Structures are given as structure tokens and as C-alpha cells.
Image: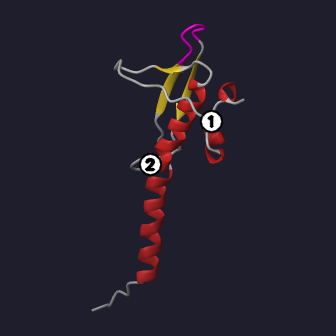
Amino acid sequence: MTKTRHHPGIASALAALTLSAAVGGCTTRESTLMRHPQTGEELFCYTREYYVESSSKDIAFSEACIHACERYGFQPVRSHSVYTPKPADPPAEFLVAVPARCLP
């Protein structure tokens, strides 16, 4: 009878490679459509890209963008009518998430 040798290092590396290939291309991000009521101009605010579930930091990117754009009259296009705008300057770490149209 021939004995087969198993190499745990190779199996682990193969499993890691398979997992990274499966997860590697599966990122997503959420968007919020913003519209200026007087001009009709539209733009999007996005969360950061994430793999499985968004974190509070990912959502904070989108919120910083929304509040920055509210300073210039943009409003989120939402399915419900109850919303209180909170115009604010975006924190420096979130500037990359804010469209140029919503920056000073």
C-alpha cells in the first residue's frame, strides 16, 4: 500500500488563494443621489468600497459628502419625505469622498 503525504502548508496556501480570488473582486459601495432643486443638477455621494458589510466609517464617508453638498443647496433624493438637512464642512479625512462641486 502506498502512503500519500499531505502538505498542510500547500493546502493552506491553496485555500488562501481561493478565498482571495473569491473575495478580491466582490466589493460594493452604496450611493445617494443628490439634486439641486433650483438647477436640477445631480451628483452622487458614495460610501467607501467594502466587501461584505459596511462599517460606520464607510457610511461616514457618504454622510460627510451629503452634508458638504447640502451647504450648496443639494438635497438627497430619498423615498421618504422626513429628512432634516445638516449642512457641514467635511472632516479632512473625508475630502476624497466629496465631489469637487461641493467643496469650497
Q: Residue at coordinates 36% horizontally, 17% vertically from top-left?
A: 81
In the displayed structure, would residue 36 be above or below residue 12?
Answer: above
The answer to if 41 sits in the magenta stretch is no
Q: Is residue 79 left or right of residue 34?
A: left
What's the coloring here?
A: secondary structure
Name the residue type under label 2.
Answer: Ser
Single out the mark in the foreground, 2 or 1.
Answer: 1
Q: Residue at coordinates 54% horizontally, 31% vertically from top-left?
A: 67
10 Å crowding of disc 1: few (<14), some (14-19), many (20+): some
In the displayed structure, would residue 45 be above or below residue 20?
Answer: above
Marker disc for residue 56: 2
Name the residue type under label 1.
Answer: Asp
Q: Is residue 65 left or right of residue 31?
A: right
Marker disc for residue 50: none
Element type where label 1 sits in the image? loop
Percent across and percent down for residue 11 are 41, 75
Element type where label 2 sits in the image? helix
Quarter of the image where the N terminus is located: bottom left
Q: Nearer the viewer, residue 57 or 16?
A: 57
The answer to if 37 sits in the magenta stretch is yes
What range is drawn magenta here? 35-40
- Please give the residue where the numbered disc 1 appears in the rendered image: 89
Q: Residue furthest right?
A: 104
Q: CA gap, disc 2 to disc 1?
A: 19 Å
In the displayed structure, would residue 23 be above or below residue 71?
Answer: below
Q: Residue at coordinates 48% horizontally, 56% vertically from top-left?
A: 21
The overriding secondary structure of the stretch rendered in magenta is loop
Percent across and percent down for residue 48 are 53, 44
Percent across and percent down for residue 18 are 44, 62
Quarter of the image where the C terminus is located: top right
